[in-house]
Image (tube, helix red, strand yellow):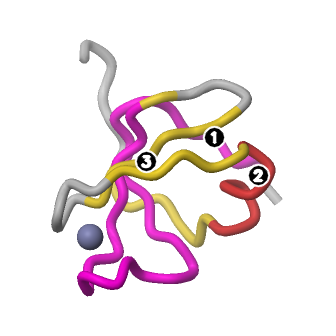
């Protein structure tokens, strides 16, 4: 098992899609809590890092260096 690695700008899929029907979330803030933004409706939520790692299903898109 590879460790889950993620950073700002990465787009991830969560176990539960957002009610708007989109299941692609962009990471916009990293800390003890992580803020992710729904790429469909731009709604953002803040969740504890531990929850994020539990709820994240897979990485959809890696942000390349240089953002
Ligand atoms: Zn949404």
Residue at 66% x, 55% y is 52
Residue at 32% x, 35% y is 63
Quarter of the displayed picture in which ligand 1 can be seen: bottom left
Which of the numbered marks, if any, corresponds to residue 20?
none
Q: Is mark 3 within 8 Å of ligand 1?
A: no
Q: Is residue 30 above or below residue 41?
A: above
Residue 17 counted in the magenta span: yes
In terms of image quadrants, where is residue 51? bottom right
* SS class, disc 1: loop
Please state if 12 lies on the left or on the right of 2 as rendered.
Answer: left
Q: Is residue 44 above or below residue 66?
A: below
List the residue tagged with mark 1. 5
Which stretch did the figure color magenta?
2-28
Residue 49 is situated, as x and y percent measured from the top left of the image, at: 72, 43
Residue at 56% x, 28% y is 30
Please state if 34 lies on the left or on the right of 3 as rendered.
Answer: left
Residue 21 counted in the magenta span: yes
Please state if 10 lies on the left or on the right of 33 as rendered.
Answer: left
Q: Looking at the image, do the residues carrying marks 1 and 2 touch, with CB atoms under 8 Å apart?
A: yes
The quadrant in which the N terminus is found is bottom right
The overriding secondary structure of the stretch rendered in magenta is loop
Residue 17 is situated, as x and y percent measured from the top left of the image, at: 42, 81
Q: Looking at the image, do the residues carrying marks 3 and 1 touch, with CB atoms under 8 Å apart?
A: no
């Amino acid at each position: 098992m590879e460790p889950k690695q993620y950073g700002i700008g990465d787009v991830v899929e969560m176990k539960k899609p957002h009610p708007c029907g989109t299941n692609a979330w962009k990471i916009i803030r990293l800390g003890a809590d992580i803020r992710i933004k729904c790429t469909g409706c731009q709604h953002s939520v803040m969740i504890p890092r531990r929850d994020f790692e539990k709820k994240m299903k897979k990485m959809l898109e890696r942000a390349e260096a240089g953002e």
